[in-house]
């Protein structure tokens, strides 16, 4: 997907509860879930879309998608109760 140079990158984030230990999690067992557009560099100017889930420090999982609709579907499906195993099954890997 091509992007316009002057448009800022797309980004959304939310917090959901996970029963896993994210070394540490945010308050009340929350983890940060995000989707962000990684703007392409010249000459192709093609973007990728990273979906990630991170605790408060250095424990997290993420994956880069070529298709925004696929990435949004993954982002929207990450909700309260998400586990490491479910994220691995969705294709996310340790970051």
Image (cartoon, helix red, strand yellow):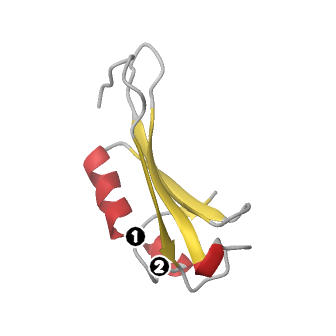
| Label 2 CA crowd tier, 10 Å (few <14, some 14–19, many 20+) | some
Disc 2 target residue: 82
Disc 1 target residue: 78
SS assignment at label 2: loop
Residue 90: which quarter of the image? bottom left
From this viewpoint, which residue is outermost toward the left? 69
* Residue 71 image point, x, y percent: 35, 53
| Label 1 CA crowd tier, 10 Å (few <14, some 14–19, many 20+) | many
SS assignment at label 1: loop
Residue 30: which quarter of the image? bottom right
**Is residue 85 shown above or below 36?**
below
Measure how far apart labels 1 and 2 are at the Cα level: 6 Å
Residue 42: which quarter of the image? top left
* Residue 39 image point, x, y percent: 45, 29
Q: Residue at x 50, y 63 (%)?
A: 92
Task: Give whichever of 41, 35 is nearer the camera.
Answer: 35
């Amino acid at each position: 997907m091509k992007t316009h140079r002057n448009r800022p990158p797309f980004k959304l984030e939310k917090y959901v509860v996970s029963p896993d230990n994210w070394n540490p999690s945010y308050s009340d067992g929350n983890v940060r879930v995000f989707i962000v557009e990684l703007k392409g560099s010249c000459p192709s100017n093609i973007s990728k879309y990273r979906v990630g889930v991170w605790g408060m420090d250095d424990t997290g999982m993420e994956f880069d998608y070529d298709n925004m609709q696929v990435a949004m579907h993954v982002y929207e499906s990450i909700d309260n109760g998400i586990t490491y195993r479910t994220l691995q099954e969705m294709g996310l890997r340790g970051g």
